[in-house]
Amino acid sequence: MVYRIHDVPKDEKLMELNNFVERFGYSVAVGNKMKTAQSINKLLQDVKNKKEQSMIELLAVRSMPKAVYTTKNTGHYGLGFDYYTHFTSPIRRYPDVMVHRLLEAKLNHTHYLKADELELLCKHSSEMEKLASDAERASIKYKQVEYLEDKIGQEFEGVISGVTEWGIFVEIIENKCEGRVSMRDMKYDQYSFDEDNYRVVGRKTGRIYTLGDKVTIKVRRADLVKKQLDFEFVSGVPSTKEVEIRNPKRYKKRR
């Protein structure tokens, strides 16, 4: 049989998620499959309409493994099913076609492919799914850049969707276009990447940018060749007075 399986999240991933959500008063059970699923469902319910909702939902999704096709069934953790496959109209996925043919063979008391042949087709289908997903993301990114090409200098409200040592990713609320604010382009301070807490922290001002924060950005550059959007922050920039009060000697010397 061709199964669609979704493995249990790794304990280290769940521990990372739990350590992060604990600061907001939530928790995730680790070590027990059923309790983990229940605690994650409760977590997603508890964060609804809260400031930290988008940030925690994003991290919860990232803690989950990717679903794949295989003949070696281990169940579908995300859906809570012991047995799960794809059986919709065969206009989108080859695994649907395989399942249709397997059922037809069973009803006709015949055979359709050997187990090892099915497994090879499952592996190929999983690889093609990833390839199609990557192509989809690339095409969406291209159209996002194309859309903002003539909006250089315009300001938009956004939400921080990612934080790395190289910069902060922001998704514009109005149109879902995502771009990056490069760390080297952030004014008034130097920022350190706090990987464990998904944030960057200003060394002088103590200013913090973290996942889920709402910010205002200005479109700085749109590069179609690289499929890259560069933003700069408009709101949330510490004032000169704030910098001076926090570090008067260092600020004056820098001036």
Image (tube, rainbow, N blue to C red):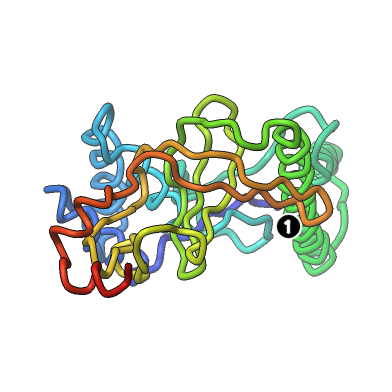
**Which quarter of the figure is the C terminus placed in?**
bottom left
Q: Amino acid at mark 1?
A: Ser
Q: Position of residue 47 (x, y in %)?
A: 25, 36
Q: Position of residue 250 (x, y in %)?
A: 22, 73
Q: Is residue 83 above or below residue 165?
A: above
How many badges with numbers are in the image? 1
Decide if residue 116 is on the left or right side of residue 234. Answer: right
Which residue sits at x=24%, y=32%? Answer: 50
Please name whichever residue, 14 or 210, is drawn nearer the observer in this view of the structure.
210
* 223 lies left or right of 234: right
Q: Nearer the viewer, residue 102 or 174?
A: 174
- Identified at 28% across, 30% down, the residue is 48
Residue named by callout 1: 126
Residue 150 lies, in percent from the top left, at 75, 31
Q: Is residue 97 left or right of residue 82?
A: right
Query: What x and y, as percent, mark residue 110?
Result: 87, 48
Res 87 quadrant in image: top right
Identify the residue at horizontal 20%, vertical 51% (top origin).
241
Dot 1 surroundings within 10 Å: few (below 14), some, or many (20 or more)?
some
Pick the front one: 195 or 98 = 195
Q: Helix, strand or loop at disc 1?
A: helix
Q: Residue at x 50, y 66 (%)?
A: 184
